[in-house]
């Protein structure tokens, strides 16, 4: 059978390194000045899915991201992992967007690219954890979607994906074009290589602005966002109860746990 | 035809300085750094001494992310109950600035950006696996499956130079060659720091401490440096002593330093922002191997260019100086189209003429003294004992000061002749 090459689009986001996130106690916002920016880890898993599909079927992998200019490091990183092309959608008009205009902006970027068979996204971003954007883009593009995938395969113009559910897994087969969202840690992203990164720096990535997408300014960014954050508050961590027990008298511990209904005795 | 004139491994002060120097001269330079961004894998106490940077970045004192200049320099012996210090402050330092506190994540990013602006290709987040060599000549670097070729490679990969070791160009560092540095950065308001350390404006404090209160024969030095709105605190622990001892854990020494009564009050209320650890090159001149050969040069910590003896810790200045010299040698080699051992021996000669090697020669063997019981145990005890006798009013008639000193030594079980011999050795090495 003739091999049909796949055109794959991966949606990625640059996020503050979650291990370093600090909340400013005064403003309650993320203090981004202290943290370094990294590629959202689930998106790295998404890129790996795209690259392995390309390994199998041939074709192209294009990475797209909406974000500020400093997201360039993420664009280069994705190219150094193996993406053929990277487009950063960046414009001050896009600032302050919630998940609705973000989905719209990315969907219109994909439409502008034109031909595609599969769109891959991470399940959610580590800095806002909504999981909205992937499904939102599928709706805007009016294509099928398979969410929370732990494994994605391709055969004869169909994507076969394994979905992780609460009580098990389900395998779904959907004809292309289709959007899949990929679970965090569901694979091992290949490493960046020096050769590919040098080539990426030489080749560069594309920056698309609002004009290029041709969207009305009131549809994007903060103006296009229906969500209003009314209030933020930090959660005070409760002091955990601790109690000392003598090792030589563990019976006390057992009986106390039993009385508090934490420990159950096997019924006779 | 090589893809690059030079590949620099490591974007710390040595590597970035070499890259800036070469790129400014029009060489085609690739600078590769495993940290992303540069500086995230690097640790140093945090005082940049000297003015070597002026050679490649004339306006660095205005544009670099400098925290504070050193106005007050303290060298102390810390015993369990006492601190005996030389506390040197001078207004002269405010016009003739010699040391600056820096934070490496900021400084290293600044330097690598300068390299990029000068025209070098700066690649971050990638580890060079090994050197590409043929017939003993270095012809490039290898990463994963790929070889990137260059006329020469400058290895500036830090205190544990894995690429140089793998290629047989350096010996793996032994316990006597390296110490373990541990560092914490405490966030404190600028006003609090100024008040606590008696500072104004962007003047800063640099303190180095001999931790003679440690038990179990473990030797360590401590340091405190003021940044704009944080304090860098850390310890440098002798690895050989740590290994001999076997039961002391390095981070306990850090804890003991920062919870010493006279140190903890300088850090009080500070929130820990960073915790890091790194090897510190300690070995003297004798441990320095040949630093160049066919198609390669070694600079910075990878070449053993740092200087630490529990009292003064320097490294970034040597790194910058050696990086610039390696860059200069590569520029000359490029002009002549000759990157052989013979041509790059220019680097060796420049080093020999520089303070980097001269310091190493002057202080040859100093690590044997500064990591000795004399400095870490005997002197602090004598000093404490003498001070107590000098300042403590007991109602008894006072002794002559020399008498007090000698008696204090005797109290510590040290004979006069032994003290003289040890003291002479110390003076000779210093």
Image (cartoon, rainbow, N blue to C red):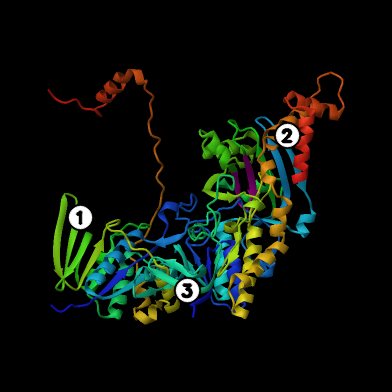
Which residue bears the numbered disc 2? B379
C-alpha separation, residue under disc 3 versus residue under disc 1: 46 Å
Q: Are marks 1 and 2 on the same chain?
A: no
Q: Residue at x 36, y 72 (%)?
A: A220
User: Residue B291: where, in percent of width, then height?
Assistant: 60, 62
Give the secondary structure at mark 3.
Answer: strand
In this view, A8 is above or below A146: below
Camera sees residue B388: no
User: Residue B326: where, in percent of width, then height?
Assistant: 62, 68
In this view, B347 is above or below B226: below
C-alpha separation, residue under disc 1 versus residue under disc 2: 67 Å
Q: Nearer the viewer, mark 2 or mark 3?
A: 3
Of residues B393 and B220, which is closer to you in this image? Answer: B220
- The magenta segment: B220-235
Give the secondary structure at mark 2.
Answer: helix
Query: Is B283 included in the stretch rendered in magenta?
Result: no
User: Residue A128: where, in percent of width, then height?
Assistant: 35, 58
Of residues A240 and B11, which is closer to you in this image? Answer: B11
Q: Chain of mark 1?
A: A
Which residue bears the numbered disc 1? A164
| Contact (Cβ within 8 Å) of mark 2 with mark 3 | no
């Amino acid at each position: 059978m003739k091999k049909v090459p796949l055109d794959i689009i991966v949606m990625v986001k640059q996020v503050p390194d979650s291990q370093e996130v600090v909340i400013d106690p005064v403003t309650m916002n993320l203090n981004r000045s202290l943290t370094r920016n990294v590629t959202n880890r689930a998106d790295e898993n998404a890129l790996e899915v795209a690259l392995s599909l390309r390994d199998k079927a041939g074709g192209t992998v294009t990475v797209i991201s909406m974000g500020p200019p400093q997201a360039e490091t993420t664009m280069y990183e994705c190219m150094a992992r193996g993406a053929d092309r990277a487009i950063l959608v960046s414009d001050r008009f896009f600032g302050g967007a919630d998940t609705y205009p973000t989905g719209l902006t990315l969907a219109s970027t994909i439409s502008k690219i034109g031909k595609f068979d599969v769109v891959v996204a991470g399940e959610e971003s580590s800095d806002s954890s909504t999981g909205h954007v992937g499904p939102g883009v599928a709706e805007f593009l009016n294509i099928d979607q398979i969410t929370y995938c732990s494994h994605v395969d391709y055969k004869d113009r169909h994507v076969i994906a394994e979905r992780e559910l609460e009580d098990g897994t389900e395998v779904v087969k959907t004809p292309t074009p289709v959007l899949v969202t990929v679970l965090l840690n569901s694979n091992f992203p290949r490493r960046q290589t020096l050769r590919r990164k040098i080539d990426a720096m030489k080749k560069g990535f594309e920056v698309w602005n609002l004009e290029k997408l041709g969207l009305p300014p009131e549809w994007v960014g903060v103006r296009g966002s229906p969500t209003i954050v009314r209030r933020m508050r930090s959660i005070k961590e409760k002091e955990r109860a601790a109690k000392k027990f003598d090792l030589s008298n563990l019976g006390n511990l057992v009986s106390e746990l039993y009385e508090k209904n934490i420990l159950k005795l096997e019924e006779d | 035809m090589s893809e690059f004139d030079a590949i620099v491994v490591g974007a710390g002060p040595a590597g970035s300085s070499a890259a800036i120097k070469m790129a400014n001269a029009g060489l085609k330079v690739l600078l590769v750094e495993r940290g992303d961004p540069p500086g995230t894998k690097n640790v140093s106490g945090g005082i940049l001494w000297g003015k070597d940077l002026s050679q490649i970045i004339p306006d660095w004192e205005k544009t670099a992310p400098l925290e504070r200049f050193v106005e007050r320099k303290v060298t102390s012996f810390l015993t369990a109950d006492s601190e005996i210090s030389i506390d040197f402050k001078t207004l002269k330092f405010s016009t003739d600035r010699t040391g600056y506190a820096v934070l490496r994540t900021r400084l290293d990013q600044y330097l690598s950006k300068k390299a990029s602006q000068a025209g070098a290709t700066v690649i971050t987040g990638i580890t060079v696996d090994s050197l590409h060599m043929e017939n003993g000549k270095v012809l490039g670097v290898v990463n994963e499956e790929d070889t990137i070729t260059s006329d020469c490679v400058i290895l500036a990969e830090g205190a544990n130079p894995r690429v140089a070791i793998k290629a047989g160009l350096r010996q793996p560092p032994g316990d006597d060659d390296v110490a373990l540095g541990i560092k914490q950065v405490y966030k404190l308001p600028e006003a609090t720091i100024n008040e606590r350390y008696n500072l104004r404006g962007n003047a800063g404090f640099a303190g180095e401490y001999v931790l003679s209160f440690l038990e179990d024969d473990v030797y360590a030095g401590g340091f405190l440096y003021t940044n704009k709105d944080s304090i860098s605190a850390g310890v440098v622990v002798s690895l050989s002593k740590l290994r001999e001892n076997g039961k002391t854990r390095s981070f306990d020494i850090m804890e003991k330093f920062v919870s010493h009564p006279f140190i903890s009050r300088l850090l009080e209320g500070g929130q820990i922002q960073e915790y890091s650890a790194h090897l510190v090159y300690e070995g003297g001149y004798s441990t320095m191997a040949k630093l160049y050969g066919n198609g390669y040069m070694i600079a910075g910590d990878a070449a053993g260019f740092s200087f630490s003896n529990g009292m003064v810790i320097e490294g970034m200045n040597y790194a910058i100086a050696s990086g610039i010299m390696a860059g200069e040698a590569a520029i000359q080699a490029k002009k002549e189209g000759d990157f052989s051992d013979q041509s790059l021996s220019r680097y060796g000669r420049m080093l020999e003429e520089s303070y980097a090697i001269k310091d190493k020669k002057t202080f040859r063997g100093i690590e044997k003294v500064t990591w000795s019981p004399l400095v870490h145990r005997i002197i602090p005890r004598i000093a404490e004992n003498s001070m107590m006798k000098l300042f403590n009013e007991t109602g008894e008639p006072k002794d002559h000061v020399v008498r007090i000193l000698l008696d204090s030594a005797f109290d510590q079980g040290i004979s006069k002749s032994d003290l003289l011999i040890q003291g002479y050795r110390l003076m000779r090495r210093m």
